[in-house]
């Protein structure tokens, strides 16, 4: 019995142990499960925390955005309000401008009508004026023609008084003479800037200067105008050699009108100063003696000093003079001394080689009625000399230029 009790106890104990064991195993399983669940819940919890935190951040972002939009909204409200005000102001302004424009239009319309009326008046006045102008033009033309006739006759009187009728030295240039200078001589000299006004100035300068000097110019004004143009066109520095100077009026004229265009302007003159072609014939018309002192006085009267000129007293063919001038070069040679064939020939042969390249030879009285020899020699020799080219043959003056 005991054994049964013991066995029963043992069996009971074993059963209990099994039950306990199972209980323990079951508890252990539950615990593990619980642990897993706790862990999972913990993870979820922290996920939820993160989500809550993210939502909180987003919420405050949204709050900020809402606040910013609210601000912008009120800015827009303010802008809309300001624009509404401006709009109203502009409407007032437009309305005012419109009224003022309407007033302008009325004024302009009135002015336009007035202008049309004035144009009609001016047209009528213009027609009247044209009639008057035509009558005036006719009267002026008649008057000018009359004045020209009177002027010409006065000029001829003056010319006559100044000796034209006696020795052919006119003191004016004709239209035809000025035209020949302008059309042929001036272009050949390359003086394209010279106009008719310059020519008229030079023409008037001749008698004006002659009136201030002693003696007379033994050449017409036109030749003197041409001579001064040639000297003006000559290379600068300009040294002139004049054979036959008489009273020096030509030299004085050149000094007066040409020297300002030159850096150096110097003249050498040769004359025996023994009267107009001889002692017994002091001068054709004037009481002034042909002497060196008169020449010097005339040069002094145009402001020339000793350094502006040199005087060779004697004949151009004199050995002493030729020797003194041997080495000298001139940009202009004026042959106006002995007007015989032999005389011009001698002067040209003796002095043409003294002319610098580009320089000029002027032979006075070419085609002059009293000096046929001069014309013959120039035509035969000067105009055909290969050292020179022909520049001009008008106004009683032959001009050639030394080739370079
Ligand atoms: C026509 S006048 C000169 C005019 C001057 N050139 C003028 O334009 O007023 C001639 C001058 O040449 C001078 N003469 C004449 N034969 C000469 C010669 N062989 N050498 C230099 N002069 C001479 C005369 O004494 C005279 O004074």
Image: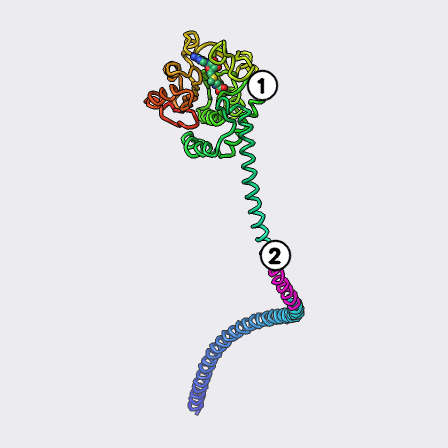
SS assignment for the magenta stretch, majority:
helix
Between 209 and 330, the residue placed more toward the observer is 209
Mark 2 crowd level (few <14, some 14–19, many ≥20, 10 Å Cα): few
For the C terminus, which image quadrant?
top left
Extreme residue in the bottom direction:
1
Q: Nearer the viewer, mark 2 or mark 1?
A: 2
Q: Secondary structure at mark 1?
A: helix
Between 169 and 96, the residue placed more toward the observer is 169
Q: Secondary structure at mark 2?
A: helix
Ligand 1 closer than 8 Å to label 1 CB:
no
| Residue 330 vertical placement versus 174 (above, below) | above
Q: Is residue 78 visible?
A: no
Residue stretch in magenta:
102-122
Residue 131 left/right relative to 369: right
Between 248 and 46, the residue placed more toward the observer is 248
Q: Position of residue 184 (x, y in %)?
A: 41, 32
Q: Residue at x 50, y 26 (%)?
A: 170
For the N terminus, which image quadrant?
bottom left
Q: Earlier in the sequence, mark 2 or mark 1?
A: 2
Q: Which residue is mark 2?
A: 125
Q: Give me the disc on residue 382.
A: none
Q: Position of residue 129 (x, y in %)?
A: 59, 53
Q: Is residue 116 magenta?
A: yes
Q: Which residue is mark 1?
A: 301
Colour treatment of the image = rainbow
| Residue 227 vertical placement versus 144 (above, below) | above
Cα–Cα span, label 2 and label 1: 59 Å
Q: Position of residue 195 (x, y in %)?
A: 49, 34
Residue 70 left/right relative to 333: right
Q: Is residue 304 visible?
A: yes
Q: Is residue 229 magenta?
A: no
């Amino acid at each position: 019995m005991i054994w049964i009790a013991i066995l029963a106890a043992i069996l009971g104990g074993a059963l209990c142990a099994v039950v306990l064991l199972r209980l323990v195993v079951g508890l252990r399983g539950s615990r593990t499960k619980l642990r897993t669940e706790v862990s999972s819940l913990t993870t979820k919890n922290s996920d939820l925390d993160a989500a809550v935190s993210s939502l909180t951040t987003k919420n405050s972002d949204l709050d900020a955005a809402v606040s910013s939009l609210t601000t912008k909204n009120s800015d827009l409200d303010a802008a809309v309000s300001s624009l509404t005000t401006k709009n109203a102001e502009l409407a007032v302004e437009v309305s005012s401008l419109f009224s003022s424009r309407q007033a302008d239009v009325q004024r302009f319309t009135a002015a336009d009508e007035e202008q049309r009326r004035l144009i009609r008046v001016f047209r009528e006045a213009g027609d009247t004026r044209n009639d008057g102008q035509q009558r005036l033009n006719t009267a002026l033309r008649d008057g000018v023609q009359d004045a020209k006739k009177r002027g010409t006759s006065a000029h001829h009187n003056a010319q006559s008084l100044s000796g034209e009728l006696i020795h052919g030295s006119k003191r004016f240039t004709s239209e035809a003479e000025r035209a020949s200078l302008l059309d042929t001589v001036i272009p050949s000299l390359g003086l394209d800037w010279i106009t008719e006004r310059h020519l008229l100035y030079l023409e008037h300068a001749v008698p004006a200067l002659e009136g201030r000097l002693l003696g007379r110019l033994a050449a017409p004004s036109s030749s003197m105008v041409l001579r001064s143009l040639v000297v003006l066109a000559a290379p600068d520095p300009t040294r002139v050699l004049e054979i036959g100077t008489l009273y020096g009026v030509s030299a004085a004229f050149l000094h007066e009108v040409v020297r300002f265009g030159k850096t150096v302007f110097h003249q050498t003159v040769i004359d025996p100063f023994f009267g107009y072609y001889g002692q017994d014939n002091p001068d054709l018309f004037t009481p002034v003696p042909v002497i060196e002192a008169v020449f010097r006085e005339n040069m002094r009267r145009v402001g020339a000093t000793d350094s502006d000129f040199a005087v060779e007293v004697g004949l151009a063919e004199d050995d002493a003079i030729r020797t003194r001038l041997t080495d000298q070069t001139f940009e202009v040679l004026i042959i106006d001394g002995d007007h015989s064939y032999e005389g011009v020939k001698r002067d040209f042969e003796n002095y043409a080689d003294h002319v610098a390249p580009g320089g000029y030879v002027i032979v006075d009285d070419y085609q002059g009625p009293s000096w046929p020899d001069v014309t013959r020699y120039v035509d035969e020799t000067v105009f055909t000399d290969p050292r020179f080219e022909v520049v001009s043959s008008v106004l009683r003056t032959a001009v050639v230029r030394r080739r370079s």
